[in-house]
Amino acid sequence: MRRYVVERSFADGVGMSAAVSSAETCRATLEANARADVTWIHSYVSGDGRKSFCLYEAPTPEAVRRASTLNRLPVDSITEVRTLDPYSFGSPPPKSALAGAKQAI
Amino acid sequence: MLLERNEQLDLILDNLDVAIRGRGALVFVGGEAGIGKTALVNAAVAGARDRGIEAFIGACDPLATPRPLGPLQDIAYELPDPAIIELLDRGPARFELFTACLKMLRGRPRLLAFEDLHWADAATLDLMTYLGRRIATTRVVLVVTYRDDELDQTHPVRVLTGELGTGEQVFRMTLPPLSQAAVTTLATGRSIDAHALYRLTEGNPFFATEVLAAGTAGVPSAVREAVMARAARLSPQAREALEVAAVAPQRVELDLLLTLCPDSEAAIDECQRRGILVADGGGLRFRHEIARDVIEHSLPAAQRRALNRRVLAWLRERGSDLELARAVHHAVAGDDWDAVLEFAPAAAARAAAMGAHRESAAHYGAAAVAAEHRRSPSDVADFVYRQACACSLSDQMAESLVLFHRALDIWQQAGDVRRVGDTLARLCRVQLTIGNGATAREAGDRAVALLEAQPASPELARALSTRAGVAARANEYDDVLRYGRRAVALAEALGEEETAVHALAYIGCAEFERGADPDGSLLTAAIERARVGGLDEHVGRSMLNLASVQLFHHDYPAARASLDAGISYADEHGFDVFVGLMRAERARLALETGDLDAAADEVGAVLRRYQAQDTRVVALTVLGRARARRGDPGVWEALDEAWRIADGTQEIQYLGPAAAARLEAALLLSSRLEESVKAAAATLDLAEARGTPWQAGELYAWLARAGHPEPITMELAEPWRRELAGEPRAAAEAWGALGCRYEASMAILWARADESDAREAVDQLQRIGARQAAAVATRRLRERGIRRIPRGAQPTTLVNPAHLTRRELEVLSLLAQGLSNAEIAARLFVSTKTVEHHVGSVLAKLHARGRVGAIAEARRLGLLSESLSTVAAPNS
């Protein structure tokens, strides 16, 4: 399965909170995703809740759109992505790099 | 004992209560082997009978090649339904048969079950598609079981459940394994450790009950051992009866068992008492197919062969012609070549008559193998040839090519020039279908040359007609007429109606396309002649061609009507390849009229299901363009494959759109511009040579938009001509009149049009969801110094909460006024089929079961108040 990041905008700042406001709506969302053959992995939501970046596994961008339609979620853009992290470069990063990252947080 | 299946059973029985009132349902029950699908069906049958409702079960068999419409035959004979039985006996009346089934389903309320659909023949799957789409209008609950663990993504059953999955009153369930608690219940009072049993069987009820029934202290390590251990505890006579039953897939008649094992009544009783065999209709079957499989494969080869021959002898004595597929199965399993040659050709012809071409091919394949042992090489070649023809009708093109070449080799060695020529003509058609334009042309030319040197023959007429087809696809109109007219004259002289109709259809296409026959009356007449002659395949192909030419002329209302009619015709007659092509064309129509959602949805379904190259090239081009316009990823992936296929065909009908699409994508995405310009310029040369005014116009226009204008050397279609002549507004109006919203906007935006026109055009691109195109256009306008460009509505209002398209909102508001589909169709100038399609997707998007629910949900979401005021103004 491929991975896609979907950017969404919410004028009222509802973010993802609306989609997962209750166990019931969450279940309905996941069911609709399953119907469209899409798996929601997780999302990042901006502090004001007006923007979200959602990571999905899906066969095609059309499947992502279909799931969004079924769940009544707006779509700004869909980008196919692959994972890149400090471990993607063959060897674990030097300890100092991790320490630096920690300090930055 | 049925454990943990209440929810599933309730769904079936609740729907039975609804079905009585005229709203049927289709329930797909998936699950691994042994998970309890049959147990659920049996419980549902019992539940139905408790309610005083008739219930019937039909099953697909694990025969080497399944009986055509096996489950329907089971049910029709049990009912009995004389109308259906008669049609089944008669054979080729497939459409009448499907309609008769629908009529039966609309009659008395019933529970029907089709078991083991993963073994179904192609005709049964087609019947399921046909009935599934109409199930809500029946009074029947149709339960269909299938093993879902062995099906890959492209298995026909998976495609079927996917296609019907969103339909009205269609339900899909997967039976989960039993919980540990349920397994513990099963093991109550046994010496076996319930926890170990659960771990070993993973909650599979069949495994669990088999292991329990084997009763060994140490749990056997595999179900095979469980089954064998159980059989081992039978008396020798009972084991003998069980072995006989095991070579008969699915069901074994009591009479058959008693004939093969005389005086075995007590032994059969024993098998039943031990729960290994169960009564089923007039016979017996294994309680589970897994057990039969284990026993059958435990038999020594010689014994298995002997048993199969004895079953065959029994079938022969009984002499029912409905059992052909069964006879072939036992003849093959018994290595009885003479019997294979006796039954397989008839079984193949029968399967073909029912539209089960895949099964027909398999039967001819069996006949070919048998002929190698018993007959002359040219007899072998004849069966191989027939197998190849059946493959080409069931989307197995690679197999078909290999087989035709094999037949060709044999006939070449035998020096049979007529058959060599004829096979070359067939090869030519297959090569055309898989997109090898050059190879196809070569085969066609060789076929004509070889046969011309012989006395005039039907084969020559066919080869000429095929060669006309090669020319038609390359838009070489003069050649179409030249070869086509010779084919018609010869075919009519020889009384070969089918070939005459075939050639006439190509002539009609060519004349319609180049404008010599503006109404397409020649093509329509050819379709009518094919219909009168009962030449279903030609009717289907010509309906496809009619729609394609209408699309070529951008006559969208006519094309839409032709596609709707053509798809349902091809669907009902089992011409899968034509259905795929027409659905791809319908997606193209949606794209060209600015309905990106509909285009992308249809294309997704087409690409999942159909493998034919000419279907894929159209679908991939549409997909790439829809993605580019929306700004979705995967544009080049789709367009590169489309280009590869188009390049293989060397046909302008595919190369033109594919090249224009690449240039469009290059401009919208700012990538790969140079190579796209080059490809477009090269393709333009071909379009000029063929004189196709729309394709050439599109390429000229995109090259000009990319800053590489080419001198215009030919007459172009109106909107392109206007744009290239520097009249963007006239071009946009021409596009608007055709219904092409995207092209209308682009004509404005790529010219130096005035500001208010430009704003309106950007707005229109936003409305149809062409975000990327709107963004690029906006950037271009900013570069020209035009600043006040609408940013489009704010994100949450841009799309209504349910993401209905504008067309769907229109349909919804008319529904809310209580209009019928026919009235809505008349109001919107579209076909009733199209309205049904929109209503279906409105219901799906609103998660509503029916119209009333949809309207209520739309009100709740505030969709109706706003759309009613704008769309339904004339009425308020």
Image (spheres, coloured by chain):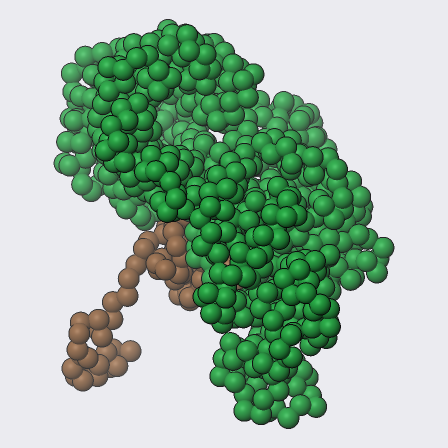
Front residue of this view, candidates B115 and A63 = B115
Q: Quadrant of the C terminus of chain B?
A: top right
How far across and down, in percent of the image, does residue B381 sit? 34, 36
Residue at 42% across / 67% down in the picture? A42
Front residue of this view, candidates B332 and B178 = B332
Taking the image as shown, residue B683 lies to the left or right of residue B356, namely left
Residue at 31% across / 26% down in the picture? B419
Q: Quadrant of the N terminus of chain B?
A: bottom right
Q: Quadrant of residue B554?
A: top left
Q: Colour of chain B?
A: green
How far across and down, in percent of the image, does residue B454 sit? 27, 15
Front residue of this view, candidates B81 and B316 = B316
Q: Is residue B479 visible?
A: yes
Q: Is residue B584 above or below residue B830?
A: below
How far across and down, in percent of the image, does residue B549 sit? 40, 19
Front residue of this view, candidates B266 and B206 = B266
Residue at 70% across / 38% down in the picture? B85
Q: Is residue B751 above or below residue B179?
A: above
Q: Is residue B584 above or below residue B485?
A: below
Q: Is residue B170 above or below residue B807?
A: below
Q: Colour of chain A?
A: brown
Q: Is residue A73 visible?
A: no
Residue at 64% across / 37% down in the picture? B88
Q: Quadrant of residue B607?
A: top left
How far across and down, in percent of the image, does residue B606 sit? 43, 41
